[in-house]
């Protein structure tokens, strides 16, 4: 009778386990059969003789006090009354609890009105065994981060907001960057927000004091994961009257973009690419500059090269005093070599002719000097010349939308005013793991895990994988001469255990302006500010009364 009863009991266990995993349950029975009685061999036939389904078996929870495990609740369970059992892993403010069992964890929220239950929770030690009953609710769909924050270093100039506390100020956020990183550490591992941002910068056609961006952040992701998400999102939401976007956007490294287009946001709809002629012009580096660079653009014969175009190019090139810029049209080979040879020497010009395969009738733009300034100037010349031609009715740019990812940005650049390091993006950008060994000795050679999204020469988005190691983050603060106390909250957040994470922000105003082919983002913004940053309707910014100044401890000087 004992063995018979055990077999009946084991058969019940097998029915239960087979519902979850047939192989596991069969192993369990075979493993214990020989330890009890050889007569139990017939028990293995249960597996083959009974067709077990969800209809003729019961769930594991049917035999316990719980209705679900802590890792089982899903969206379909919203609104259901459930019972959970497990261990108290964490509690905060007597209202938020984390319950754990062998299957997962579930967050519990206690009503603010239930004071008696809150007192009970406050008295419970961690790892207390609990049975709880409640209604399943969904997590909030949206997260909205604050607009008022503290002034922090390492970014754009911020707007300062006075307070009633003497000598203390808020600042308007230039982006939700720090907040969304803290959300990742707080286990909200997927975040998006249509965020209003503020930057006290000079106005341009693609910039104004306040703007809107689609802000995205994810934990446990990679550069490829973020980029794929953005590609699929844009493909899904792309205007139907435009040609559909490709499944995968083109990619170009920062170095290639600068050397071929003279810009980290290249317009790839037309050629006019830069050619590296540094070796040809090397004899001109009489000062032995370590970053000497020479480049040229060759325009095929037949393109316009009027006196008005030449004058505008001359004026445009005067912005960069450290770079020597030349431009001319080859009308006759011998005369051109002779004339340009007076500036560059005959040998240099002859080698240039052969290296670039010049022909009579072509136009040559040439520049040499410090590398970054030289490339930047030629990138601007490239765009300016294309625009001048299109103003005269010559179609240069393809009439299409070309998306491009620019990757492998340098992590640092030099501030030419102070000679100190500054970040190309922001101080929370992760260095490329292959370049970590260069941080101490060759920081300017370190690449970052940053990526920009470019549409027709306009940067419409930028993001990166973030630093999640507090030691590495503090090291970058030191390299950038950033006072760690001003960003202590970030170091505390990372020290608490922050997952790897990354994100991106898309400028909605810029994206709309580019799609609609309008020259300024002000054309797609309701109530835009002027180039001076003023509101043309109300006249803001405006003066405030003396009473308000006293309230906010403001003293103005003329």
Image (tube, rainbow, N blue to C red):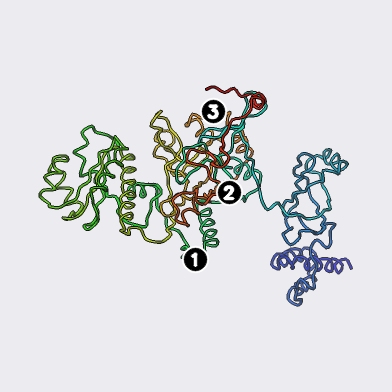
Is 349 above or below relative to 413?
below
Instruction: Give the residue at mark 2.
Output: 217
Residue 122 rendering spot, x and y as whole percentages: 82, 38
Chain-order first, disc 3 or disc 1: 1
Chain-order first, disc 2 or disc 1: 2
Query: Residue placed at 84% from the left, 61% from the top?
Result: 63
Residue 76 rendering spot, x and y as whole percentages: 74, 62
Check whether the beta carbons of the residues at disc 2 and disc 1 lie within 8 A of each other.
no
Q: Residues within 10 Å of mark 1 (few under 14, many from 20)?
A: few
Which mark is on residue 483?
A: 3
Quarter assignment of residue 498: top right
Q: Is residue 167 left or right of residue 327?
A: right
Instruction: Give the residue at mark 1.
Output: 241
Measure how far apart labels 2 and 1 are at the Cα level. 30 Å
Task: Say which of marks 3 and 1 sits in front.
Answer: 1
Query: Residue placed at 56% from the left, 49% from the top?
Result: 526
Chain-order first, disc 2 or disc 3: 2
């Amino acid at each position: 009778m004992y063995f018979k009863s055990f077999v009946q009991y084991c058969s019940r266990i097998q029915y239960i386990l087979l519902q979850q995993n047939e192989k596991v349950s069969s192993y369990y029975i075979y493993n214990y059969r020989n330890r009890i009685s050889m007569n139990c061999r017939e028990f293995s036939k249960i597996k083959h003789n009974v067709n077990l389904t969800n209809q003729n078996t019961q769930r594991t929870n049917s035999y316990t006090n719980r209705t679900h495990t802590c890792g089982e609740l899903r969206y379909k369970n919203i609104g259901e009354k459930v019972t959970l059992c497990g261990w108290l892993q964490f509690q905060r403010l007597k209202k938020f609890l984390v319950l754990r069992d062998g299957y997962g964890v579930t967050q519990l929220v206690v009503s603010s009105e239930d004071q008696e239950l809150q007192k009970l929770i406050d008295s419970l030690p961690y790892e207390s065994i609990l049975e709880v009953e409640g209604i399943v609710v969904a997590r909030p769909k949206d997260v909205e981060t604050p607009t008022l924050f503290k002034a922090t270093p390492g970014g754009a100039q911020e707007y300062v907001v006075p307070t009633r506390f003497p000598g203390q100020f808020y600042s308007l956020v230039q982006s939700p960057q720090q907040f969304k990183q803290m959300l990742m550490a707080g286990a909200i591992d997927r975040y998006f927000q249509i965020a209003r941002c503020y930057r006290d910068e000079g106005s341009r056609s693609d910039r104004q004091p306040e703007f809107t961006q689609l802000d995205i952040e994810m934990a446990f992701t990679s550069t490829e994961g973020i980029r794929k998400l953005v590609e699929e999102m844009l493909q899904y939401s792309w205007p139907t009257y435009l040609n559909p976007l490709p499944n995968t956007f083109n990619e170009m490294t920062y170095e290639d973009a600068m050397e071929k287009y003279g810009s980290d946001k290249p317009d790839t709809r037309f050629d006019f690419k830069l050619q590296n002629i540094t070796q040809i012009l090397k004899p001109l580096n009489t000062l032995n500059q370590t970053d000497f660079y020479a480049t040229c653009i060759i325009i095929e014969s037949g393109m316009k090269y009027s006196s008005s175009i030449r004058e505008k190019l001359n004026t445009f090139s005067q912005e960069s005093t450290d770079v020597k810029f030349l431009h001319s049209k080859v009308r006759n080979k011998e005369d051109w070599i002779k004339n340009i040879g007076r500036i560059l020497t005959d040998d240099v010009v002859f080698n240039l002719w052969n290296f670039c395969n010049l022909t009579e009738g072509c136009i040559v733009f040439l520049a040499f000097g410090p590398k970054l300034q030289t490339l930047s100037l030629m990138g601007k010349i490239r765009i300016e010349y294309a625009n001048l031609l299109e103003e005269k009715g010559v179609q240069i740019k393809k009439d299409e939308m070309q998306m491009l990812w620019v990757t492998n940005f340098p992590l640092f650049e030099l501030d030419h005013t102070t000679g100190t390091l500054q970040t190309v993006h922001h101080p929370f950008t992760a260095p490329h793991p292959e370049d970590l060994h260069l941080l101490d000795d060759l920081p300017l050679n370190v690449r970052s895990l940053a990526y920009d999204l470019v549409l027709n020469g306009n940067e419409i988005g930028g993001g990166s994988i973030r630093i999640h190691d507090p030691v590495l983050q503090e090291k970058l603060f030191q390299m950038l001469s950033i006072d760690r106390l001003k960003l202590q909250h970030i170091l505390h957040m990372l020290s608490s255990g922050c997952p790897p994470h990354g994100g991106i922000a898309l400028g909605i105003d810029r994206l709309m302006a580019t799609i609609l082919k309008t020259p300024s983002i002000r054309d797609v913004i309701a109530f835009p500010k002027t180039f001076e940053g003023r509101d043309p309707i109300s006249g803001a910014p405006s003066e405030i009364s003396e009473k308000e100044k006293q309230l906010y401890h403001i003293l103005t000087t003329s």
